[in-house]
Amino acid sequence: MPTPLDVPSDLLVDRLSKFLKENVGEVAPPTWALTAKTGSHRERPPSSPDWWYVRCASLLRKLYLHGPVGIARLKVEYGGRLRRGTHIEHSRTAGGSAIREPLQQLQKAGFVAVEAKKGRKITAEGISLLNRMTAEILKSAKRAEAH
């Protein structure tokens, strides 16, 4: 059975974000998602209108790879450098609501569960979804090679 480690992450996240947008009703961007920045290190909000679904797909992939993960560690993962002009750059963590709320929506959809004192982990339904998407990507790649 192929796993998400067997395919490039950008292909998996793209395919998974399209699936979440079209098929999962619990996952939808809130009203503030189009105007809010994703962290203090960003100058502007995301330019893509579908960034919410990409973030949800990326979070699912990270939970699959790194096991139970807390919000604080995910904030560091999605953080970046704060540009301060001529001063030395400093690292900043990402905004918490741009991580917490997608995880809550994925939890309502049944793909994520909370493990006590360890953070959030991916459920069996989430694992099967990621494995199924990985298999589809590999099948389409084999078909492309055959032609």
Image (tube, grey):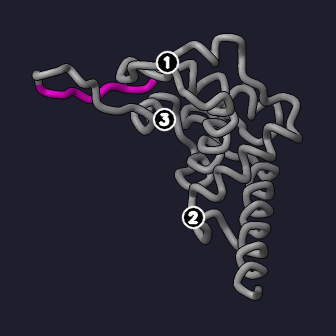
Q: Nearer the viewer, residue 95 or 66?
A: 95
Task: Tell me residue 30's x, y (percent).
Answer: 72, 16
Using the image, determine if residue 35 lies above or below residue 130: above
Closer to the camera: disc 3 or disc 2? 2
Q: Nearer the viewer, residue 130 or 122?
A: 130
In the image, farthest residue toward the bottom: 146
Of the residues shown, which amino acid type is indicated by label 3? Leu
Q: Nearer the viewer, residue 36 or 110?
A: 36
Q: Which residue is mark 2?
A: 8
Report the quarter where the C terminus lies: bottom right
Q: Secondary structure at mark 3?
A: helix
Report the quarter where the N terminus lies: bottom right
Task: Tell me residue 127's x, y (percent).
Answer: 74, 55
**Toward which corner of the image does residue 142 lie, by quadrant?**
bottom right
| Circles 1 and 2: CB atoms closer than 8 Å | no
| Residue plotted at (75% across, 28% down) | 105
Q: CA distance from mark 3 to mark 2?
A: 21 Å
**Toward which corner of the image does residue 100 lie, by quadrant?**
top right
Q: Which residue is mark 1?
A: 37
Badge 3 density bin: few <14, some 14–19, many ≥20, Cα 10 Å: some
Q: Which residue is mark 3?
A: 74
